[in-house]
Amino acid sequence: MQTDRNGVLWVVASFVIWGFMPIYWKYLEHVGSDEILTGRIVWAFISTVLAVLLIRGGGQLIRDFRTLWKDQRSFWSLFAASVLVTSNWFIYIWAVNHHFIVQTSLGYYMNPLVSVLLGVLFLKEKMSRAQKAAFALAAIGVITMVFFYGKFPWIAIGLALTFAVYGFIKKNIQLDALRGLAIETTFIFPFAVGYYAWLFFKGEARFLHVSTQTDILLILTGIATALPLVLYAKGVQRIPLYMSGFIQYIAPTLMLIIGVLVFHESFGQQELLSFSFIWAALILFTTSKVYETVKIRKSHI
């Protein structure tokens, strides 16, 4: 596959946006994580549906719904995927606004390893020796963290698991990125509206009750959600898979830097030791995947 320069730029841009998202959520720290999530769902739904209509894709969106409904397995699989990505969003937002940005970066570093594990467990895929060694190193990293802190890194594991399973389900459902997000948020939208109504009824909603800046930031969560996803979907089709594998580490690396340097989260010798095992695992894992890709390409020449 020939590398497309624009494809690389779009994919890099998507991961840079995702990497800087902790700063965005920190500006909404005074809003509860539950309301931020609710607003994100509502405005992501509105933004994506409007975007689909603007590019005259409304008819195709309706056809996508009908096709999904006819295939009940795909319909409910996508519903499950929407629940998983909503859970992922909540864990991430809560973690960022409770000073766990470093642990969120660990979760997204671990995501590709968990994705491979799902393939082994459910698709009976075989792991190479290098991949087995990578898993062993990652496990040592997690155990090291548990040993030093006496706590299981549930945020990192929760983020890695929910996003990996979400990707695993979406892999088998062929949908345009923008329309796919519109459909996913449609599933959760009624629950979000109901919860927002409840917050307003109790007088606990921050939207329209704090400041214009807060209102604008909450509204823009829809665009902040949709834009990087669309950029990624547009770009990933134009570049080799191994290159996308390298680029994806931009996001957790930026999260780690922001957590430590901007928000002064702890990152001492214990954290460095745990992360070193994870980084070593990722280097081994990614290198082995690149080697496999090159080997396959040579065999087809």
Image (cartoon, rainbow, N blue to C red):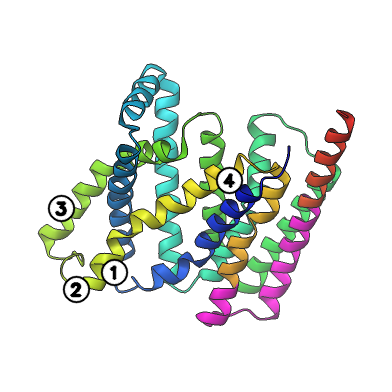
Q: Secondary structure at mark 4?
A: helix
- Eye-nearest disc, 4 or 3: 4
Sequence-earlier tag: 4 or 2: 2
Amino acid residing under circle 3:
Ala
- Residue drawn at x 80%, y 39% is 293
Hey, which residue is sitting farthest top in the picture?
Answer: 70
Residue 87 higher or lower than 256, as above or below: above
Q: Secondary structure at mark 1?
A: loop
Identify the mark at residue 235; answer none if there is no mark: 4
Q: Quadrant of residue 107?
A: bottom right
Q: Secondary structure at mark 2?
A: loop
What residue is pinned by disc 2? 210
Magenta stretch: includes residue 281: yes
User: How far apart in space, not on screen, are marks 2 and 1 (Cα)?
Assistant: 9 Å
Sequence-earlier tag: 3 or 2: 3
Q: Are marks 4 and 2 in contact (CB under 8 Å)?
A: no
User: How far apart in space, not on screen, are marks 4 and 1 (Cα)?
Assistant: 33 Å
Identify the mark at residue 31; answer none if there is no mark: 1
Residue 67 as seen in the image, left or right of residue 163: left
